[in-house]
Amino acid sequence: MNMISLQKTNTIGVIGSGAMGSGIAQVAAAAGENVVLYDSSTAALQKAKASLDATLKKLAEKGKMRAEEANAVLSRIRFASDLGEFSGCGLVIEAIIEDLQVKQKVFSELEAIVTGDCVLATNTSSLPVTAIASACAQPARVIGIHFFNPAPLLPLVEIIPSSFTDAALPARAKSLMEKWKKVPVIAKDTPGFIVNRVARPFYSEAIRIYEEGFVGQQGQGFATIDWAMKEFGGFKMGPFELMDLIGNDVNYTVTETVWKQFFFDPKYKPSLTQKRLFEARLFGKKTGRGYYDYSRPMPEPLKDITLGENICWRVLVMLINEAADALYYGVAAKEDIDLAMTKGVNYPKGLLKWADEKGIEFCLQTMDRLYAEYGEDRYRASVQLRKMVREGKRKFYE
Ligand code: NAI
């Protein structure tokens, strides 16, 4: 097999010019790379060109970039309607539709075009990188490089080696991402990688609390939980505002995918409340209505401090428990788990650091209390927390 290098990244190929692909192209070009951006749809390619043009102009107008620099970034992106233009690339990043068969087909088509040492990366958020690589003649060159939306603004990139990936490739991908001014973390090829797994309780526990009805009905209930997470947790957005922004179609689908991929582990079970919104096409801000109705004034929360603190800590402990579990099962190193949540979804603090501050024992006791109360597997405490308490280990970071 040829040496897979990533050194020769003089041209970066990006396949799929949608929200993610055009953002990734912008990031690479801003870092000085020459980029070829391809899409099978001419309309999508034209749209990407117009929107990159507008974005870079805006950056120059706002003084975030010199006008010449903005022009230079744009001139480094070549918009291609022929896959053959990837032939000289050192790295191709795929950001097409989230469909395993389509991705596998594109990867084998790419292999017939690129040279033997070209690295093929996928930006998938929910498909196993190993399954995509399995369709390749040279699966050792395939790796996950997962950006967050919007790619130019969110610093996190998850690097995901598959079962086949060349052992030297993750470190090389990491240094390339650093060159692109990103914050890379390495994650195991497990459902949701780090962020989309660890963040699940932010949404699901918030919905569960709402469903229990003691926080107020409808809008007031959502507003109370959003207020609690912002007021006592320091989150920039509450879970319902955030789901409405991400889109309940996207957020529900990620939840369902992670749950299915974990063989229906009840910890990740989606909620009927969100499923109904999804079925009603009440996707959130983009459709004018989701949890909130954006044609009306926003509802007022019930600003009860004890209630707010209880809500916040219940959600936070569930998040900490998930982060601890990800650590226990070797999904990533503790520093990477904390970085992932602060740099990928803007959490005010790393969850394991938060656990240290609040106390591991408190977290375990909260989980055990929830489990005793509800008797549901969804509330099972992570072995990581239980072991730490048993062994008298008080902190993740000593
Ligand atoms: P999008 O729908 O905005 O763009 C996808 C583009 O791929 C479209 O322009 C489409 O024409 C093109 N395409 C579809 N099939 C193709 C093919 N066979 N060959 C070439 N082009 C093709 O999708 P988005 O949101 O940019 O997502 C792309 C990938 O990135 C997916 O795998 C998604 O899971 C992942 N991702 C999405 C994030 C998000 O928040 N939107 C975040 C991180 C990853």
Image (tube, helix red, strand yellow):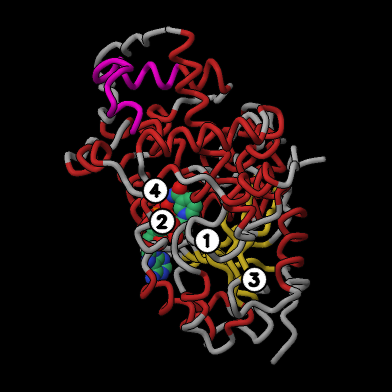
Of circles 1 and 4, which is in front?
A: 4
Q: CA distance from mark 1 to mark 4?
A: 32 Å
Of residues 213 and 273, the one drawn nearer to the viewer in this rendering: 213
Q: Which residue is mark 3?
A: 91
Give amino acid for label 2: Val
Image disc number at residue 123 = 1
Q: Which residue is mark 4?
A: 377
Of residues 3 and 309, the one drawn nearer to the viewer in this rendering: 309
- Crowd rating for badge 4 (residues with CA inside 10 Å; few <14, some 14–19, many 20+): few
Main SS type for the magenta part? helix
State which quarter of the image contains the N terminus. bottom right
Q: Which residue is mark 2?
A: 258
Give amino acid for label 1: Asn
- Crowd rating for badge 3 (residues with CA inside 10 Å; few <14, some 14–19, many 20+): many
For the point 52% across and 20% down, the residue is 230
* Residue 201, horizontal then vertical, whole percent: 45, 39
Among the two numbered marks 3 and 2 on one chain, the one whose residue lies closer to the N terminus: 3
Q: Which residues are magenta?
A: 208-227
